[in-house]
Amino acid sequence: GKILFNDTIIERKKIIDIEDRGYQFGDGIYEVIGVYGGKLFMLDEHLERLERSAKELQLALPVRLTILKEKIVELVSTNGLHEGVVYLQISRGVAERWHQFPSDDVTPVLVAYTKVEETLSDAENHGAKAVLTEDIRWLRCDIKTLNLLPNVLAKQKAIENNAVEAILHRGDIITEASASNVFIVKSGELYTHPADNYILNGITRRKIFALCEKLNMKVNEETFTVAELLRADEVFVTATKLDIIPIIKVDDTIIGDGKPGDIVRNIVEAYRHSIQELVSD
Ligand code: PLP
């Protein structure tokens, strides 16, 4: 397929310089946007978050957001992507390797490409296992940066233990998972970590809030502990294209009755419905 390079759609070829700061320092930001039936899901929200990440790192966007939006839509249709994601990253650019920001004439480098990904409907329907691991990340997890080594190590631990996700805790407090947000259900109400510097404010997470409002379910943006997670009635994780995965076992602890609970099943159904609306729109 083709790729987006700054504001131009070109053939995919090797374009990354060894002195790209994204490559050398992880000095950059990214977004992963879901595509269902050829349509981009919550594109505006992703672009807003991209803009925020850029601002927090004092990184100038190389392309105006209105142009970028058009180009992303064009890329999806040019590549004929039906089910998958658009991966987009912006690095601070190419410059001689010094830690400090390069001079102003160095422009950030934007690349985006499409990737086929199927929905994990088996895990969505039947639930899956997660492992617990200490959250060893920095204190600005609200910025979607390219620095993902702690997330990589956590996810690897999950996979080695036949789990879909690694749920992270800072001491006693559950923050999120290696590449998704975590919700628990307790006495009919939902709980998830507040959107502060300890978590990424997921676009899927925000969609769950909107769906729960329609379903008349209360969501509390409040922290909860490892012990509360382990004795929750239901647990689920949310992320782009992963969608919503019920967690039925955490390490050796069975959650609830070991099956996806009623609340998460209702939310999955409402989520699928909103995707269906997008696709048939
Ligand atoms: N938290 C982390 C650390 C992530 O990497 C992700 C995304 O992959 C999420 C949460 C979920 O965010 P979103 O729903 O916007 O994909």
Image: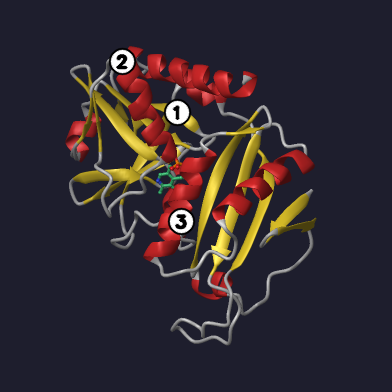
Q: Nearer the viewer, mark 1 or mark 3?
A: 3
First-in-chain label (2 vs 1): 1
The front one of 117 and 171 is 117
Relative vertical location of residue 262 with respect to residue 140 in this rendering, above or below:
above
How busy is the neighbourhood of tag 2: few (under 14 within 10 Å), some, or many (20 plus)? few
Q: Which residue is mark 1?
A: 244
* Rendered image quadrant of residue 231: top left
First-in-chain label (3 vs 2): 3
Disc 2 element? loop
Marks 2 and 1, how far apart in space? Answer: 18 Å
Taking the image as drawn, is residue 281 in sight? yes
Q: How is the image coloured?
A: secondary structure
Amino acid type at circle 2 is: Asp
Horizontal and vertical percent for residue 232?
23, 25
Horizontal and vertical percent for residue 229?
24, 33
Disc 3 element? helix
Marks 1 and 3, how far apart in space? Answer: 25 Å
Marks 3 and 2, how far apart in space? Answer: 42 Å
Amino acid type at circle 3 is: Glu
Q: Which residue is mark 3?
A: 51
The front one of 104 and 120 is 104
Task: Identify the mark at residue 257; answer none if there is no mark.
Answer: 2
Residue at 68% x, 44% y is 115
Q: Quadrant of the C terminus?
A: top right
Horizontal and vertical percent for residue 6?
66, 62
Residue at 40% x, 63% y is 55
Horizontal and vertical percent for residue 255?
30, 24
Residue 68 in the figure: left or right of residue 178: right
Amino acid type at circle 1 is: Ile
